[in-house]
Amino acid sequence: MSTSAEAHHLRAFRFGKGMMAADFKSHILSRDEKGFGGIPFKRLLLGGISGGFAYTVFRFALPNVAIPAGVIVAVLLIVMTAPRGGLPLWMRLWLNLRGTLLLSAAGNQNGLAAELAKLLALSLESAELDGHALFAPPAGLVEVDLSEWVTFAHARDLDRGDGLVFVNAPLSAAMLDEEAL
Amino acid sequence: MSHVRTFLIEPFDIMLHATEVGVAMLQARFSTWLRTLSGEARFLCWQMPATLDPKIGTLDATQADTDDPQRRDLLIEYRREYERMNATAAYQRALCGMALWDDQNPRAIAGGLASAFDTPVTEAAFPALFEGRYELRDRPFWHLAPSGRPGGRPYWAVLTSYEFAPATWNFFRPLPPLLRLNFPLALAVDIPKTYDRNAAIDAIESIIQAYQVHLAGARGEDSRSVQRVIDCRRALQEINNGDALHLVQIAIAVAADDLDTLKERVAAVVNETRAWFSLRQEMGELLAQAVGFFSAKRTKEVNLPETTWPVTSRELALMLAPLGYRKLSTTDGVLRGEAVGGAYPVFHNSWRDKRATHEVWVGQSGYGKTFALNCYLTREYAENGISFDFLEPMGHGRHIAEAFGLPWYVLSAKATRLNPQDVMFPTLLEQVSHTTRLYETVLGRQLSGGQRENLERGLLGEALETLYRGFPDLNRVSPDLAPTCETVCDVLSQLGDKPAIQSIAHDLADEIAGLCTGSGPWSSFLNGTTNIDLTRGGRNWISPRVFSFHELEGDPILQALAYTQVLSAIRRDSLIDEQPRIIAVDEVYRLMRHPSLLDFLIEAAKTFRTRRKKALMVDQQMSVFLEGKARLIFENCPIRVIFSQRQGMNIFRDDAAFAHFNQQHRDIIAQLPRFHFVLDIQDEGLWYLFGKATPGELARFKTT
């Protein structure tokens, strides 16, 4: 961008500083109460409940390792729910795995990866995108190709099969020759 | 389930709103429309780097085709200038669109959008983000690569928002700087849900209640919760004031020709927006799904993890800021100026329509009207081969005449003679009416409205008819054969079958003779054979002509008559062919103040239009075009070029023709510096432009 354009925009921005604006708010539809050590309360709560549940289960099966199991499950859940990019860690790992599986399956559609992809209901179509299909205009905006239609004045004319058709180049020599034949 | 409707929205120039009040009004208008949203919606903006290469290519082709050395030189000069602009600037082309899931009539929706955004909106399909097949790749990072032969197709990455920082947004930050990054990108503001007012209030109140419980039991400070309660209360207040609550997420698609550049560009976008919102680079199947944000696919079908953010209508309005950043549009047509603010050249082709598009230019003396007009005429001549006639009363037509070596017709009271009886119209009725109008101007009174005046009109018409009927074919009456004023007076004085009528005829003949013959004040100018060649002379194409009337300055009537006769000759020639031509009339008020000539001008404007002749009327004040019948001329001119109008601003405030101007537009018009103007093209848009000239134009017309 030219210097003058920059200057104009800077002027506009300075101008805009005192202007009508909006101070964006925090997420007013979700709760995020303070927890401990920078970890929100809800994650601590989830970790605590899961750890407690694991401890209870292990108390029946393997009482000797119940305490370490409860602690490990609690810590694991806290770690795995740590958000990054707006997604919890477990989801990112899962998506990464699915993505890798998808590419492997797309590369070899008869291999183990393809079987696993099928098992996980992974659509191999998403490995290759068709711009034409993806960005097709909405149904209402698709132009009707009239040349694909045969028009009859009366329903009974259908039996005779002498309907009218739209042609692309009505005056072209080829069409006229065909008519003559 | 509602059907999706896609609309393309023409971006406007935010510089035309850049005051506190202007921007506040813009935000209010946008948010008022957003409050009415009920279903899903998505705003999109596609941006591609652009160059002036198509324009340069067109000039090259024209240059190769033309045989005129003067045009060729001018075309080389313009090409150089566009090449220089290309090299020193980085232009972009931008397109905005809106997808709405709504069952209303699409035309009604487009109308609502157009009135809310004050810019043209049409129902149309969205452009494709990319062409052909693309495949997912995970190395070195997740991206989309062209499948098969790339054919110059770029790589793409998609980023989606997941968190909005508590920062201040306005129409200048953070989205416009993002759109100034000079690489191809597309931005989608997805609005998957707009809450019902009561549901929104309930949801927020329940959050407040939960936080209050938490804070009541919490030990120590929890500033985030305190802030969240404050934010919730602010949102409630805004919703209670009429705003709606929307869920929003932003998706940005970035393209590059190689992966290293793509990585850099992704980092640039993330850094640019970090202070306002955080972006996540999509991976795996999410990347494939996120591309759906740039199509007319529902958010549910895009199926990304929920990372929307709740915003009120007044906040969401600021996310539509890209609408206010018009970029380089078409390169079809001639350069009209450089946008103030965006610094992109604005081209306009006013010859697309089969008919010509007339223009009104207004502006105080010394603000660059004449200079801009000279530049415009030169460009149309060079680039499109459109010839022109330039009529002006100050003598500055010399500059353009000298620059092109054109014949400079200076009409003078002493040396020029223009016979009012010269045949300018094809039928006798029209010709008689035209000559009668000229005599009315000479007499300074209209020959109608009273009994005597009506008789006078009849008698003068009879005299003229008698004279013209003497010729077998009116259209073959050359200036050397046309009857003179003296002859008209002789014939007129002999008319009448009753003494009373004879007396009236005699008196009128004496009156005309006293003014136009013998030693009358206008005899040397009007009585005799026209001595200036206004004929077509068998030519297929008439080269540009410049007519100056400054030597008639002392006599406004002579000046008006001269203008009319020259315009009549041009009009007569206009009927012969449909070659485009520009007829520029400076200080047009000099004609319009004579009622008879005003009628002529109105009629000429209509004739010119159907014959592809563009009338370009120039004057100092817009008010002269809006009074009485002159308004008919104004209404025939869809293009308005407005230079500084410090005086007469009330017109822009009070007249319905300028109802589309807001206070900021009026302020700009009142304070336009030299060489700056507002270009108002009916149904197309409004531009605030600087009259950019090439070094060649500056050298040629600097004295103007």
Image: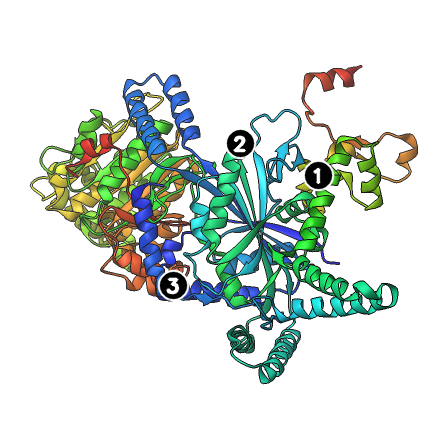
Which chain does tag 2 point to?
Answer: B
- Quick check: marks 2 and 1 in contact, CB under 8 Å? no
Q: Quadrant of residue B477?
A: top left
Could you give the CA–CA distance between mark 2 and mark 1, rounded to whole angstroms? 25 Å
Could you give the CA–CA distance between mark 3 and mark 2, rounded to whole angstroms? 42 Å
| Foreground of the two, B348 or B46 | B46
Q: Quadrant of residue B312?
A: bottom right
**Labels 3 and 2: the sequence-earlier one:** 3
Which chain does tag 3 point to?
Answer: B
- The three-letter code of the residue at mark 2 reads Asp
How many neighbours does mark 2 have within 10 angstroms: few (below 14), some (14-19), or many (20 or more)?
A: few
Which of label 3 and label 1 is nearer to you?
Answer: 1
- Quick check: marks 3 and 1 in contact, CB under 8 Å? no
Q: Which mark is residue A133?
A: 1
Where does the image place residue B153, in percent across and percent down from the top left? Answer: 57, 30
Q: On the image, numbered disc 3 is attached to which residue?
A: B22
Q: Secondary structure at mark 3?
A: helix
Which of label 2 and label 1 is nearer to you?
Answer: 2
Q: In this view of the protein, can residue B519 be seen by the observer?
A: yes
